[in-house]
Every structure is written in C-alpha cells, then in structure tokens.
Image: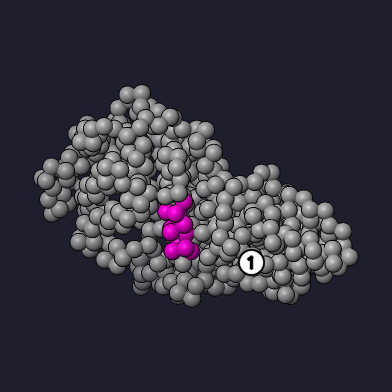
Amino acid sequence: MATPQEKLADSLEALKALQDRGVVAIRTADLSRTHRERLVKNGFLKDVMKGWYIPASPNEDRGETTAWYASFWRFCAAYLNARFGDDWCIGPEQSLSLHAGNLTVPPQLLVRAPKGSNKPTALLHGTSIFDMRATMPGAGDIMTMDGLRVYTPAAALAHISAGYFVQQATDARTALASFTDASDILAQLLEGGHSVIAGRLAGAFRNIGRDRIADDIIGAMNAAGYKVRETDPFENRFDIALPRREISPHAGRIRLMWQTMREAVIDNFPPVPGLPNDIDAYLKRVDDAYVADAYHSLSIEGYRVSPALIERVRSGGWNPDAEKEDCDHRDAMAARGYYQAFEQVKNSIRAILNHENPSAVADRDHGSWYRELFAPSVAAGLVKASDLAGYRSGNVYIRRSMHVPPPPAAVRDAMPVFFEMLEGEDNPAVRIVLGHFIFVYIHPYMDGNGRMGRFLMNVMLASAGYPWTVVPVEQRDAYMDTLEQASAAQNIVPFARFVGDLVADRLAGAPVAGVPSG
C-alpha cells in the first residue's frame, strides 16, 4: 500500500506533466479529483475560481500574492480562450499599455467579447476580469501578444479615451514614440472619419516632438475633406529628445519615466553637501558602516546573518566549513559575497572621489559587484556558474509586487538606456533615487537586484559627498511599499521622500543603523 508521501509524489508528477507543457491555468478536467484535492490540501495548487487553479508553493505565507501576480497574464489568456474561443480581446487602453511595455497587473482587466456577461469575474487578491458585451474590432485590428488578444498599436491609439493621456501618460508617450510615420494611424482615422481623434493624436505626437507625424495627420485628414482642430491631450510637455524610433518600448519607458519623475525627486531630497576633501577619511567612514550595512541589506533579502558572522568575514577569520555549525551555509556564502562586493564598491567610490564620472564608473563596474556578490555561492555549488555571465536569461518576478519586470530580451535594450540616462543626469539626487529605483524596476539579474540597487544608491550618494546610508531592516515594509508605488503606480514621491529622509538623518549626525549585539 502506498504511503501518503508516495501518493503526494504521484500527484506532483501529474502536476509537473502539466507544467512541462506550459500549463499555468489548470482546469478541473486537467487533473483527477484525487490528485487535485491532494495538491490543494498540501498547498501545491491554489483555487482561483470554481474549476480553475494555479500552481503554488506550500511554503507561501497566508495572503502571499507572488504566485498569482506571476501567473496573472497567462491565466487570463487561458481562461478567456476557454470561455470565448477567439471571440474576445483586451480593451484598447490596456492593449496600448501592454504595447508600451507596462506589464503591471491591473486591479481589473477590461475585455471585449460579443458573448460577454457585462459583469466582473472575481479573481485572487482583489483582481478581476470584466467581460463587456461588445462588438469586436476588425480582424486586422487584433493581434496576439504572448497569448493575449489585443488591439494593434494603431487601432488602440484610435480607440483610447482622452483621459488615458493624463492617467497613463508614460504609457501613451511610450506607445507614440514607437511610430516612425503616420501610415497605420491614418488608415484608422480616415476609414472612420475620426476628425476629433485625429486632432488629439496630432497634438499628442507634437507633444513628444514628432512634428512630421502630426503634420501628416492634419494634412491627410484635411485633404480627405475633414476639418481637424489640433489639441494636446497631455497635461504637460517634457523637453526630451526621443530617438526617431526607440529600439523597444521598454527602453522608451526608461527615458520617459526618468524625465517624468526627476522634478519630484529634486523637490524631496536634501541639499548636496559637496565632495569631501579627504578621500581616505570618507572611505574610512564607509568602512565603519560595513557591519550595519551588510546586516541590514542581507536581512532585508531574508538572509539570517549576525554581526559576529559579518565581522568574521571581514577580519579573515571566516571558515566556510566551520560556519556550517553556526548558520545556514547559504547565509554564510551570502555574507562572504557581500563583503567581496562591498570591497569592489569601495574601489568604485575611490575612482569617483578622484573625479571620474560616477555614472560611467557604475556602468563599468556594476558587473564586478554582481560577480563578487555571488562568487562564494558559485564556489559552494549553491549558484550555477552560468548565472555570473551577465544579465538574466529568464523571467523574474518580485515577491508581492504587481509590477512584472521586463522579459530578458527587453533587459538588454533597457540597461544601456538606463546608464545613458544616469550619465546624462546632472542632478545628484536624481541619480541617487532614480538610479536605485529604475535599476530594481528593470531587475536585470535573477537574484541580488535589491542589494545591487542599494550599492548603486550609495555610489551615487558618494558622488555628491553624502554619507553612506543604510536602509534599516525595521523599515523594510515602508521601503518596499514606496518602491511598489513607484513601480506599479508611477508615483516616485514616496520613495524619494523615504530615501531623502534617511539621508537627511545621516547628514544631521544620526548613526548608520543599529545592529543586534553578539
């Protein structure tokens, strides 16, 4: 007779077979009742709605959202295909946001379907799908994007509301910047005689500096006999030179987010103290902050490290085999990696204090910080050596965040633009706050992004003479919440204030941060 463990193993094999086929949205019919009930009981399946499940981890805390946010888009595609076949598509606003590289999970996904019910279908964690009974756009106006049926970019622009340009300004500008000429848009406008929309889109293109497209829209509509009055639907205009065509929407988002957020950062950050005269004294103060910095930064990421372990790592009294007796091997390797990376970061700071360009130094050196951060874990066999090759080659999800980082190919487009914006920025506060935030927004590595973001923040702090600043683990929830507001709601003010307040306290003489005794 099979033991409970053997029965669970059989059920897990059945679940693995589905996952190997790429199935994320699991229907009742996909598993036998016995397997299904056993997997739910043991926490390997989570109910989304009646008859639908997603894979989960039994180690997740109650109310944990990560598995759901990571599954959201693929689940919705599978559910909508099962319910409506090919007769559905996501609404124009959400379609345009997806084209603009915004993969944030929305509270409610609006879907058009001729057989829609005109009511919401509740999903997990306060999310829902609203399937609106509505006619479908023409076949040529729909495309499939990662399994989702969406409006094409031109069709979406022709059907979004005027309010979208205010409520989702970054998405709108990112989408507009992807057009090199007016052809596809004019096909939409001329077919329907949309003179009001034509005036709005002409004004929108002129707002981002695409005067030729704006003029072509006005000229073509006038030639066809339509009277067009140009209006700018955006609330403001940014003085930013966008490339004629951005290499990807994700790269365009980085440029636009930077420009949109920078003034709010400047308004919420303490004045610049200026570079120190004594470089060695500044680096001595950085060294003095090491124990507190390592303890708090590693603790924020969930490692269990003690100040004693951190001191042993620094003093050379660290023995990887002996450490196994006092703490988890993974934690010991993380502590050693943090020390090695910290030393590399100090070398970068010295170069900056000797008047090298801080952004160029960060661009040049951040790969070595990352390699040192994980070198001990690679040596111990805890991390694959290939993970040190560079930016991630797989998708990654942030725990409890509605923000979905860009896919691997987009990372390679976004990171050069990120460092371009960092190097072109003349305000230190902007380099500090947006350097940290946009780095973790892109999430270029499979692991270590938070630690890397805080290293980058402190390198940029040093470039203006601010003291090394620690994010205390006791303020982890506030820290993560402000990052979430910046990522999911595009509101940088809380994060700028959070970092600015920590730095202001250090300027006023507050200690780095407390650590437990022992």
Residue 377 x %, y % = 24, 58
Residue 118 placement, left or right of 514: right
Q: Write the residue at 50% across / 32% down.
A: 268
In which quadrant of the rendered image does the C terminus lie?
Answer: top left
For the residue pair 13 and 106, the one nearer the viewer reads as: 106
Q: Does residue 74 sit above or below 487 in this rendering? A: below
Q: Write the residue at 54% across / 37% down.
A: 264
Query: Label 1 sits on what residue type?
Result: Thr
Secondary structure that dominates the magenta span: helix
Residue 389 x %, y % = 31, 65
Q: Which residue in the rendered view is the most extreme toward the right?
A: 225
Residue 338 placement, left or right of 242: left
Q: Quickly name the residue at label 1.
A: 180
Badge 1 element: loop
Q: Write the residue at 35% across / 66% down.
A: 5
Q: Does residue 68 sit above or below 326 in this rendering? A: below
Residue 450 x %, y % = 38, 48
Q: Is residue 145 magenta?
A: no
Q: Does residue 176 sit above or below 18 in this rendering? A: above
User: Toward which corner of the image does residue 383 lie, by quadrant?
Assistant: bottom left
For the residue pair 386 and 426, the one nearer the viewer reads as: 426
How many marks the image carries: the answer is 1
Which residue range is magenta in the image? 410-421
